[in-house]
Image: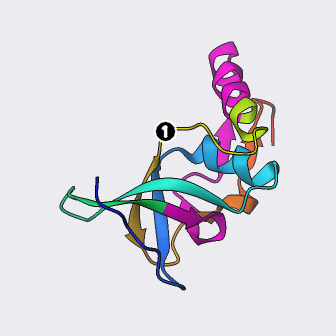
Amino acid sequence: MKQFTHVAGALYRVMEGVPRAKAAALHGHSQIRAEIIDASGQSQGEGLLPLDALRSPKSVIRRITPADETRWNRAVSGAMQAVLPYPAILVQPCGEQGTKIEDIGFDFGGSP
C-alpha cells in the first residue's frame, strides 16, 4: 500500500471506523491510521491522520444492544494501548460536513 501524507487543513469523512476514532480521542490519542479512498473508490494510500481532521456522518454512536456494547468495548480496549492496534479506518476527503469526532455522543436508547 502506498503512503499517504496529510496536508494541513484537509478534512476527511469517516466511512468506516467512527467508534475506533472516538475511543482513540477519549483515550488521549491525537492521530489514527487511515486508508484514504477517493470519490471513485480508489485507494490513495494509507497514513496517520489527525483526529481533529476527521468528520463523522453520525452524530452518535449506538450503544443499545449487547452487540453494540461489545463493539464499543473492543474499540476502547484498543484505545487504551500506547500504539493503536486497529486496522486502518476508511476515510474520504470532504468539506466541513459531518460531526467532529470530539462532538460525537452516545445513544443508550433512552428518550431524548
Magenta span includes 17: no
In this rendering, the answer to whether 82 lies above or below 74 is: below
Q: Residues within 10 Å of mark 1 (few under 14, many from 20)?
A: few
In this rendering, the answer to whether 111 lies above or below 7 is: above
Q: How many marks?
A: 1
Residue 60, horizontal then vertical, whole percent = 67, 47
User: Which residue corresponds to the image point at 81% horizontal and 31% vertical from the top-left?
Assistant: 110
Q: Is residue 86 left or right of residue 39?
A: right
User: Which residue corresponds to the image point at 27% horizontal and 65% vertical from the top-left?
Assistant: 38
Of residue 37 and residue 87, the one placed in the foreground of this image is 87
Residue 4 falls in image quadrant? bottom left
Secondary element type, mark 1: loop
Q: Is residue 24 left or right of residue 1?
A: right
User: Which residue corresponds to the image point at 74% horizontal and 54% vertical from the top-left?
Assistant: 25
Residue 105, horizontal then vertical, whole percent = 75, 49
Q: Is residue 71 left or right of residue 5?
A: right
Q: How is the image coloured?
A: rainbow
Residue 108 falls in image quadrant? top right
What amino acid does circle 1 point to?
A: Pro
Of residue 100 and residue 80, the one placed in the foreground of this image is 80
Provide the residue span drawn in magenta. 48-75
Residue bearing mark 1: 87
Of residue 68 and residue 2, the one placed in the foreground of this image is 2
Residue 22, horizontal then vertical, whole percent = 69, 49
Magenta span includes 70: yes
In this rendering, the answer to whether 48 lies above or below 58 is: below
Image quadrant occupied by the C terminus: top right
Residue 6, horizontal then vertical, whole percent = 47, 75
Q: Residue furthest top?
A: 66
